[in-house]
Image (cartoon, rainbow, N blue to C red):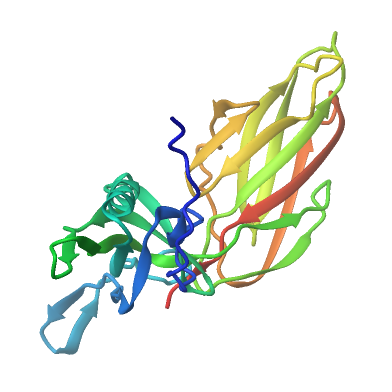
């Protein structure tokens, strides 16, 4: 027997999504006035000192002067309606997300919140004859402080020429540098090279060896992920220079450069930078 069916719940009029899927795809809907977005407080520290009113500000900040922010709690009341089978299906679909790290969209037009989702207890509602009619529960997201906007891409000029861009968001964001290199084909002498990138004069170097490519190879990728603090060349881990650090870029104007050298084994290359805007509201 074919038990597949199309869920046609149209009760959800919100724009809320879980990992990109609307609540109706989970056979539930949001309850009016059932959404709460908690505050995110800065992590500060002050040290009392004799003779100094207010003491000393001992707050740790990043290179741009921003302190760390605490997580925030977001709650969403949802309901499932229909016959008992439909309600049970909704509970299992939502229950499958319990405890997972998810993205919640639709709470703001700026982006999605990320965090661990907790599914609360379901409260069943029956009619006078005892038939289950609908059920409600509360979703709680232990969220990071920021709303993350769509990923942005900036194509970079070559050979260290500056690329100017405007960084969206209202908090610093770590960039991800991408370099795609077409190496010369086969039978080349390995050559030690250095990949160099800058973000607002913050420089990061990656040492590498170019050994040539197969005839049908696609461009070989180098990825410097400043958020994950991880570098890969052709999928294998690499390291940045020991006296470098992974840069971040504040909102507003930014300048990027990138190059690879020497280019003995480089036929051609392209490069770009991506980042995810961070909004604190």
Q: Position of residue 59 (x, y in %)?
A: 28, 71
Find the residue positioned furthest to the top: 187
The quarter of the image holding the N terminus is top left
Q: Where is residue 41 in the image (x, y as percent from the top left)?
A: 28, 75
Q: In which quarter of the image is residue 204?
A: top right
Q: Is residue 167 above or below residue 91?
A: below
Q: Position of residue 120 (x, y in %)?
A: 19, 58
Q: Quadrant of residue 262?
A: top right
Q: Quadrant of residue 114?
A: bottom left
Q: How many labels does the image show?
A: 0
Q: Is residue 59 above or below residue 80?
A: below
Q: Is residue 23 above or below residue 261?
A: below
Residue at left offset 17%, top offset 69%: 127
Q: In this view, does 12 lie above or below 52?
A: above
The quarter of the image holding the C terminus is bottom left
> 216 or 269: nearer the eye?
216
Find the residue positioned furthest to the front: 129
Residue at left offset 39%, top offset 56%: 27
> 205 or 164: nearer the eye?
164
> 11 or 59: nearer the eye?
11
In the picture provided, is 203 more to the left or to the right than 138?
right
């Amino acid at each position: 027997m074919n038990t597949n069916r199309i869920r046609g719940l149209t009760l959800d009029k919100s724009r809320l999504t879980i990992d990109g899927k609307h609540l109706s795809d989970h056979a539930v809907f949001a309850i009016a006035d059932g959404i709460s977005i908690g505050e995110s407080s800065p992590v500060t520290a002050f040290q009392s000192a004799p003779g100094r009113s207010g003491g000393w500000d001992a707050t740790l900040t990043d290179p741009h002067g921003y302190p760390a922010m605490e997580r925030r709690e977001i709650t969403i009341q949802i309901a499932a309606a229909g016959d008992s089978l439909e309600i049970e299906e909704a509970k299992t679909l939502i229950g499958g997300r319990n405890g997972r790290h998810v993205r919640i969209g639709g709470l703001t037009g700026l982006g999605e919140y990320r965090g661990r989702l907790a599914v609360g207890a379901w409260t069943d509602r029956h009619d006078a004859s005892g038939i289950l009619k609908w059920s409600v529960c509360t979703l709680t997201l232990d969220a990071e402080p920021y709303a993350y906007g769509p990923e942005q891409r900036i194509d970079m000029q070559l050979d260290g020429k500056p690329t100017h861009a405007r960084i969206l968001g209202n908090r610093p964001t770590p960039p991800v540098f991408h370099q795609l290199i077409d190496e010369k084909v086969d039978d080349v002498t390995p050559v030690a090279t250095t990949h160099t990138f800058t973000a607002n004069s913050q420089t990061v170097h990656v040492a590498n060896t170019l050994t040539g490519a197969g005839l049908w190879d696609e461009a070989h990728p180098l990825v410097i992920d400043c958020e994950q603090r991880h570098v890969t060349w052709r999928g294998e881990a690499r390291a940045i220079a020991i006296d470098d650090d992974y840069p971040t870029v504040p909102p507003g104007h930014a300048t990027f450069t990138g190059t690879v050298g020497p280019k003995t084994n480089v036929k051609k290359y392209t490069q770009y930078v991506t980042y995810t805007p961070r909004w604190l509201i």
